[in-house]
């Protein structure tokens, strides 16, 4: 056993410096990964990020708050950064690329991306938001023409609500609707006092703000006439329905089904977060939204953004990688998919190594058998090493030609022995297989010993 380790150490020392460094690095990574994984429970302690959400009364802020609470339970930290909405989130997230103080944001789908943006997609939330228009006289509005000349609030400046509302109003330009931007709570108060006729917002239909607007402020949902035509011109939008009595089944609020436009919410990053952190954040969202993976795996990505590598592997494997859970720093060195590719490359390398080793061993054996056949021609068929050791020279072996032929065979055997020893010390020989070369060396040495003894008898 000690001889085996000595041979291994000599082979490593004889290897090129770059190969030795690569072997030591792989051994260190493997040992560190085993040490990191042993006896540990997976956690999100490595997740320390900031996420741009929205107004503190809005749905985005509430979503990030739920995710932050989940991460905190698993010893991580998420800073919920309030903002005016999706448009501001895109601008701030792009600007944060320089300092990396903010790494992620929630934004509406269908917004325009900057020309040279750094964004990558982590996924869409399973539940879409709705573009809802509220009014005190919602039931009197029967068609789009009834909106002529009305005063409409379109949410805070720089918000996703403003962006979508302006796209919708552009299709209704001939109705001369007067628009103004207001924070959501202020907009609802203006609607309640009659200072605004319409109030648009992109919001979760289950948000507390919507329930208060319907029950306490006595506002109604405008049934958007021609909603299918309007949604057609909005990127990534689709139609939905809020059923009658959804907010109050006793008083039946709303009193009838209301058609609305539904818009997905995206979780995006600016590339600042490490691979393990991105995977950990997706895990937190999966804890809060159990069907997060299914939605993103089954639906096509039409957002215009590429999935982050961590998200792509997460969805394809239907969950986080175990290495990323127990030893996050490993996938920070290189994504898990690259580790798999590296392992595959090493398996191909070892297969090629084994093939080359067997090929060289075959060639050595073939050359030795060829020399044995030549020895048989020189003496007699079927001659063995022991026969040659005891063979007495006869006159046909004492000619100069016979002597020269014997010397040539000895030189061939000497060269073959050196070649065999060189191959046995090569790094291409799999561990433990060098004994095959030792066997060939033994056979070659026996023939060399017998031929030299016969040659000495000729000289005597």
Image (cartoon, rainbow, N blue to C red):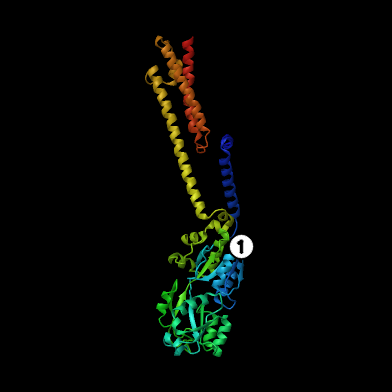
Q: In the structure shown, which secondary structural element does the residue marked by tag 1 occupy?
A: loop
Residue at 54% x, 90% y: name it: 194
Residue at 50% x, 54% y: name it: 337
> Is residue 263 at least partly visible in the picture?
yes
Residue at 60% x, 76% y: name it: 56
Question: Foreground: 301 or 142?
Answer: 142
Mark 1 surroundings: few (<14), some (14-19) or many (≥20) residues within 10 A: some
Give above or below for 6 relative to 189: above
Indicate the position of residue 433 as horizontal and vertical percent values: 49, 36
Asked where in the image residue 58 lies, by quadrant, the reply is bottom right
Q: Which residue is mark 1?
A: 100
Task: Name the quadrant of the N terminus.
Answer: top right
> Is residue 247 at least partly visible in the picture?
no
Indicate the position of residue 147 as horizontal and vertical percent values: 46, 86
Question: Foreground: 355 or 384?
Answer: 355
Question: Foreground: 94 or 77?
Answer: 94
Indicate the position of residue 350 as horizontal and vertical percent values: 48, 42
Give above or below for 216 relative to 287: below
């Amino acid at each position: 056993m000690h001889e085996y380790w000595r041979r291994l150490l000599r082979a490593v020392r004889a290897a090129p410096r770059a190969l030795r460094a690569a072997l030591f690095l792989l051994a260190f990574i493997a040992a560190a990964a085993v040490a990191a994984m042993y006896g540990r429970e997976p956690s999100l302690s490595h997740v320390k990020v900031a996420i741009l959400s929205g107004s503190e009364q809005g749905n985005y802020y509430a979503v990030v708050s739920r995710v932050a609470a989940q991460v905190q339970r698993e010893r991580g930290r998420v800073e919920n950064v309030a903002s005016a909405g999706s448009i501001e989130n895109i601008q701030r997230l792009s600007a944060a690329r320089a300092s990396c103080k903010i790494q992620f944001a929630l934004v509406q789908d269908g917004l325009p991306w900057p020309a040279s943006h750094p964004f990558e997609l982590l996924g869409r939330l399973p539940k879409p938001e709705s573009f809802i228009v509220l009014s005190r006289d919602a039931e009197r509005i029967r068609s789009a023409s009834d909106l002529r000349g009305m005063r409409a609030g379109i949410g805070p400046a720089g918000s996703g609500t403003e962006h979508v509302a302006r796209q919708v109003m552009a299709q209704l330009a001939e109705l001369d609707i007067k628009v103004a931007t207001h924070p959501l709570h202020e907009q609802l108060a203006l609607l309640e006092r009659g200072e605004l006729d319409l109030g648009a917002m992109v919001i979760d239909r289950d948000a507390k703000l919507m329930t208060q607007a319907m029950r306490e402020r006595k506002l109604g949902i405008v049934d958007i006439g021609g909603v299918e035509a309007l949604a057609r011109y909005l990127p990534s939008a689709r139609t939905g329905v809020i059923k009658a009595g959804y907010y109050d089944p006793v008083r039946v609020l709303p009193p009838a089904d209301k058609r609305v436009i539904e818009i997905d919410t995206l979780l995006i990053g600016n590339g600042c977060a490490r691979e393990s952190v991105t995977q950990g954040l997706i895990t937190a969202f999966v804890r809060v939204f159990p069907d997060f993976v299914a939605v993103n795996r089954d639906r096509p990505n039409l957002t215009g953004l590429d999935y982050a590598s961590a998200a792509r592997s997460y969805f394809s494997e239907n969950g986080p990688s175990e290495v990323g859970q127990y030893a996050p720093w490993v996938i920070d060195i290189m994504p898990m998919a690259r580790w798999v590719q590296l392992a595959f490359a090493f398996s191909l390398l070892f297969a090629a190594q084994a093939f080359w080793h067997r090929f060289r061993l075959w060639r050595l054996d073939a050359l030795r058998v060829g020399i044995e056949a030549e020895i048989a021609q020189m003496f007699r068929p079927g001659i063995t090493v022991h026969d040659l050791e005891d063979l007495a020279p006869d006159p046909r072996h004492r000619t100069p030609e016979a002597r020269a032929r014997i010397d040539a065979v000895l030189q061939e055997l000497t060269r073959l022995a050196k070649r065999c020893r060189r191959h046995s010390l090569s790094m291409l020989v799999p561990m433990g297989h060098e004994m095959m070369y030792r066997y060939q060396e033994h056979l070659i040495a026996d023939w060399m010993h017998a031929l030299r003894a016969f040659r000495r008898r000729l000289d005597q």
